[in-house]
Amino acid sequence: MTFYIGFMKQNTDEITLKKIRKGSATSTDREAIRLLRKHGILSLATWVTDFEEVSDRDFIRSLKQLLWYDPDQIMSLYVTPHRWTGYYRIASERRVIQLDQSKWDYKHQVLEAKYMSPWRIFLWVKCIELILQVRPRALWRSFFQSDQASRHGMSWYIRMGRRVIAHELWNFLLHDFRVSNGPTLREFWGMSQDYQEIPLRITSANGASMQSKIVIKP
């Protein structure tokens, strides 16, 4: 069994995807998911949230976008700026709310959002995960599709997802201590090192160079 790994961002429009330099596009991601399903391959979409000006409308738009993509499963992550990426420079003046460096693992919110508190972002993320998991298409693929291996993979992911949500909720309420008015990202980590970033590039049929990334792995 293989999984497609697509990187989809909060405000999943083409401008945002270009801004964070992931070499992705909404139309090609959706087509890739469709083709993989056609050939019996499960799709896992990685959705990244927590950009600075995120709002309730952005989460609603992201939910609609994810439903339009129609992946078999999703993995929700929080944007985590590394010093060697271009996004670090963009976010360098954002306030850090998570000082524990062990939690800079994409599964915790580490930067302050301008319009939303951490609990609201967390609640939105979990609600979107739940909606994607219990929508009729996902339930059919998990329990009723004819391919036994795919059915097993889908149901296993749902079982693990329930355990992960319980674990994340427990940690969010009792263990993930956050600070207010923390240091800026640049004060916390130092100056940007984005000059060290080397995006993957491929050459198109007409000889033009363009950014991309590996999206399929065995």
Image (cartoon, rainbow, N blue to C red):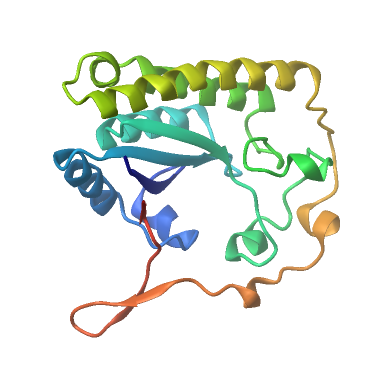
Viewer-proximal residue among 152 and 107: 152
Q: Residue at x 66, y 67 (%)?
A: 84
Q: Quarter holding the N terminus? A: top left
Q: Residue at x 66, y 38 (%)?
A: 114
- Quadrant location of residue 70? top left
159 left or right of 142 in image: right
**Could you say where residue 111 lies in the image, as x and y percent from the top left?**
70, 42
**Could you say where residue 78 lies in the image, as x and y percent from the top left?**
59, 40
From the viewer's perspective, is residue 116 above or below residue 20? Answer: above
212 left or right of 91 in image: left
Q: Residue at x 72, y 68 (%)?
A: 192
54 left or right of 190 in image: left
Q: Residue furthest front?
A: 148
Viewer-proximal residue among 141 and 117: 141
Q: Residue furthest bottom?
A: 207
- Quadrant location of residue 186? bottom right
How many discs mark residues in the rendered view?
Answer: 0
Viewer-proximal residue among 214 and 68: 214
Q: Residue at x 57, y 44 (%)?
A: 51
**Could you say where residue 143 lies in the image, as x and y percent from the top left?**
27, 14
From the viewer's perspective, is residue 206 above or below residue 33? Answer: below
**Could you say where residue 46 lies in the image, as x and y percent from the top left?**
44, 41
